[in-house]
Image (tube, rainbow, N blue to C red):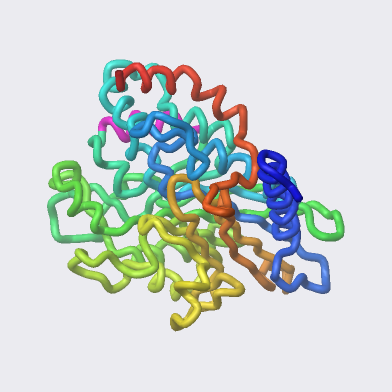
Amino acid sequence: MIQGKKKVIFIFFFTVITLQVVFNNPKAQVPSKPYIQVRILETTDLHAKMLGYDYEKGKPTVEYGLEWTASFIKKARNEVPNSVLFDVGDVLVGNALGKYVSNTYLFNWMEMHPVYKVMNLINYDAATVGNHEFNYGLAFLMESLKGANFPYVNANIYIDDQNKYGGDDINFFNPYTIIEKKFTDSSGKTHRLKIGVIGLITPIAAEWDKETFYGKLKIKNMTETAEHFIPIMKEKGADIIVALAHVGLNADKGLKYKKGNSVYSLSKVKGVDAILYGHSHSLFPNKDIHSNLEGINVKAGTIHGIAAVQAGYWGNHLGIIDLYLVKNNGKWVISNSHSMVKPIYRTLKLKKIPMLSPDPTVKKVMEKDHIRVLDSLK
């Protein structure tokens, strides 16, 4: 029999091997002709959890932290020739690190926000804002965003010009970006692919942070906004379109106008190829929750036929969408897709066992800021 520490070590390595098998066996049917597999990776609702450390309890944890998720990101990237990484918001607020930076950062604009030190290290391709990004005010948010070495997009937050005519409204953020990358197909040929990325946020953010929004910004309907910008993105050459949506599967309960402000609604917008979403701190696909819901294919991870994923919160999961693209009549089209979420730990015999080791480079980048936070808590 395997006893004590040897048993734990055995369980750990067995778990890692099991993970590798799952990662390397996507359930999507591979096209028969040459195709491009694009792996889309998602984090969401990180809430400043860069490290696996519980500041309230004053001890490390394996249950969350981007330093753990970063190892999954590396592994997922290494398995395929083509990948992109996105975040879906709520990264700046949520723990002692976020609070410490908000209390000190305004006095030292020269220093990059620690969250972006880590996200830049991991090489995100784009991100969108969540509702909590506005908790510390616009000045703090905009100065913090200067630290990101990747584009931030949002299409439905507008400058409030105080008139009732919407035709002259101006976006507060860049509504979208088109990322052009060299991707390799299954036959080894290289192609340039243009990925259009649009950001959207639940309008309830304006109600929850009235002091930040009132008289300055307004949030329009998510679906109507997507219907406006997606044809523009297509005209500008986007081969596929990814929506970064900081909203749940269903509209927020306290929202006055729910129609068009949910992932369900976005999945019906023509031209959307993949939806990465967050905000509700849930998982998609999840057979225990979504198996019998209308329009959802849990095995494929689609909503009304559109690939979708929601990666939990605090970095406790990595969201993965594999798109398989083939060329028809000179255009790239999606032949098949598969979505999945991967947990950073498993619970075995009431013990939480990490699936991979944390990324040591994240801990190194965060070392000084982590010490500062700990000192502030004394």
Horizontal side of 244 relative to 131 (left or right) equals right
Between 138 and 252, the one nearer to me in the picture = 252
Instruction: Between residue 286 and residue 6, name the one nearer to us.
Output: 6
Residue at x 63% of width, y 47% of height: 355
Question: Which quarter of the rendered picture does the C terminus lie within?
Answer: top left
Q: Residue at x 24, y 35 (%)?
A: 136
Residue 278, image x and y in percent? 41, 56
Q: Position of residue 281 (x, y in %)?
A: 39, 56
Asked whether residue 282 is drawn in magenta, I would say: no
Work out whether 259 lies above or below 171: below
Does residue 95 lie above or below 24 as drawn? Answer: above
| Dominant secondary structure (helix, strand or loop) of the stretch shown in magenta | helix
Q: Nearer the viewer, residue 134 or 22?
A: 22
Q: Specify whether 292 is left or right of 2.
A: left
Residue 42 is at least partly visible in this image: no
Q: How many marks?
A: 0
The quadrant where residue 246 appears: bottom left
Q: Position of residue 195 (x, y in %)?
A: 59, 55
Residue 27: quadrant of the picture: bottom right
Residue at the spot 44% in from the left edge and 59% down from the top edge: 277
For residue 141: magenta? yes
Where's residue 118, x and y in %? 51, 31
Q: Give, as a single range, the part of the protein colored magenta.
A: 139-149
User: In the rendered image, which quarter is residue 164 located in?
Assistant: bottom left
Residue 110 shown left or right of residue 322 in the figure: left
